[in-house]
Amino acid sequence: MATTVQPKSKDRVLATAHQIVKSLNINTQATEDMINIFSRFDNRLSNITDLIQNDAKFNDQFRKAEKIILHHDSDASPELEQSSDYLAAVDLLIQLTENLTVESYSFGDVIDRAENALQLAMSKLEDDFRHALIHNTVPLDADRLYGSVRSVSRPNLSNNSEIGGEIEDEIEGDLDRFVEDEQEGSTLHHERGASLGGDLCVDLIRVEAIDELKEIADRMIRSGYEKECCQVYTAVRRDVLDECLMILGVERLSIEEVQRIEWKIMDEKLKKWILALKVVVRVLLFGEKRLCETIFNESELVQEICFVETTKSCVMQLLNFGEAVAISPRSSEKLFRILDMYEVVGDVLHELEALFVSESGELVCSEAKGVLNGLGMTAVGTFIEFENAVKGENSKAMQNGDIHPLTRYVMNYLKLLVDYSDSMNTLLPKNDYDPSSSPPENSDGVAAISPIATRVQELIASLQSNVDEKSRLYEDSALRYVFLMNNVLYIVQKVKESELRNLLGDQWIRKHRGKIRQWHTSYLRAAWGKALLCLKDEGIGGSSSGASKMILKERFKNFNACFEDIYRIQTLWKVSDAQLKEELRISISEKVLPAYRAFLGRFGSRLESARHGGRYIKYYPDDLENYLLDLFEGKPVVMNLTKRKST
């Protein structure tokens, strides 16, 4: 049976062979026989003959290699590129240290000199490796990067007034600090940040330098200097990634610093953070992974160590910032940015797990999961606080009956929130509704009621209850109905024009439109009932010709007073929706003008011929119609008698 000689044993056998042959000092034939005996242990030992017979040639090659190494080591200006002679000299020294690792009688001094020369060579290669890494680094090109980024922002919610900037400033997490505001044209707008193009690739090192770096790394690893090689690589590349974070606008902040930053400033930082996390994971980390695999293809272990140690600090800085935001004080306006952060961490988590597959990278993945859970809990907690704030908000109703800022804010808030339905359905507790049972009331046949749908329905119901409570504070019942119409119509419109419609259903919309029609009718009765009573025939006495002039004068006088009072008051009232405003004016015209025209036709002649008749018949139907156009504009108007078309 053949005997297999292990590497260390081979070295010992080789050294022993030289010692025995020299000590025996026997004839040539005996020497050859001895060598043949030892050579049977392994084919490699056949080289012993060559080493002995070519001792002079070997020593000559070694001295040349040693000279090249020492000459380059004494050179004060290190070369950027390795000469072929220098690398060949290093290779020879590596081969020597691999094959002659045990001192022998003949080669002990050579091994010592080879190891010393190799140590000098490794020191130089380490410097050259660092030099090549630094001087071939390509800074992150932010302009090119952002040019490859598609901006994904929420569209403007409406061309109409949404929520005044002053109101939005007031809402710093508590809805109980609403103030009256009539500013037009501003919107509750949320920009989600940016999305990377799928083909975005960034090289942070010159491609032409990779072969040089690989040649150096290969020799350092073969020589047992992989630790020094890793240290140089990770130190340089870690600094490169830190600089990339700075270019992307990410600062290194403590938890205390994060919590002290004003929200508007923090919001801008978070948008940069979201983009930076995408860039780092999907572009930079994958680039670093490829670079490590290329440069250190001689050792998978070195690849993994260098990748983890290079990138871990950068990723942890991003995750620590996310954790600090997650534990910061909550407020309603933070919810969407928190959800953006939650979604982007969730999106890149699988990629992080694919990149950090070794045990040394488990910390990064574990931290990412912790940040994801923390952001999710913060999002749910923020939403619950928002629900409670809507229920408990107790500001006064609008003096002019206009849409309340609470209504604007909540509906635009919900309109944005439904775009995060998938995330919210994941985070919110599941409800007990059974999709196989009949749909709940007002669901319009929607079979499955998701957690977000349930909470949205409940929140809008709370908003409507709040609006109803505010409406009861009006002393003028007609203004109460205008306020209810304004606010509920706004709610219905926001539902119709967004994904909220899918959550609430068309039956819900029809039901609330029916309520608006009822309030419309109630408004006409409350606002114009007294004026219309003045135009009744009852109590005037007899026919047109026999009617009492005194009673007629009183009726016209009372009607004029009622109309002028209504005009003075209701021109100050505000109806924001143009269609509702037009419908109210038309219904008033249809209700009041025919009655006034008929009353004037029957009894007007009795006063027109009387002395001072103009004091009582101040308006004709066309005059009233013109004046009605001034109602619900929300601004004071002085009754202009020149509007009269008749005299």
Image (cartoon, rainbow, N blue to C red):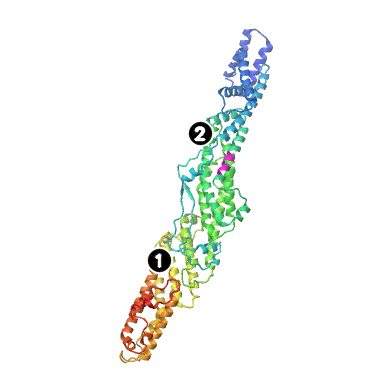
Amino acid of disc 2: Val
Q: Disc 2 designates what residue?
A: 207
Left or right, residue 363 beside residue 609: right
In this view of the protein, which residue sits in the foreground, 104 or 430? 104
Residue 154, image x, y percentages: 46, 55
Residue 40, image x, y percentages: 59, 16
Quadrant of the image occupied by residue 171: bottom right
Amino acid of disc 1: Ile
Magenta stretch, main secondary structure class: helix
User: Magenta segment range?
Assistant: 237-244
Q: Quadrant of the N terminus?
A: top right
Q: Classify mark 1: helix, strand or loop.
A: helix
In this view of the protein, which residue sits in the foreground, 457 or 45? 457
In this view of the protein, which residue sits in the foreground, 237 or 106? 237
Q: Residue at x 43, y 76 (%)?
A: 638
10 Å crowding of disc 1: few (<14), some (14-19), many (20+): some
Q: CA distance from mark 2 to mark 1?
A: 62 Å
Is residue 32 inside the magenta stretch?
no
Q: Are marks 2 and 1 in contact (CB under 8 Å)?
A: no
Q: Disc 1 designates what residue?
A: 509
Left or right, residue 39 beside residue 560: right
Is residue 238 inside the magenta stretch?
yes
Examine the rendered structure and indicate whether residue 153 appears above or below residue 599. above
- Checking the image for residue 302, the label placed there is none
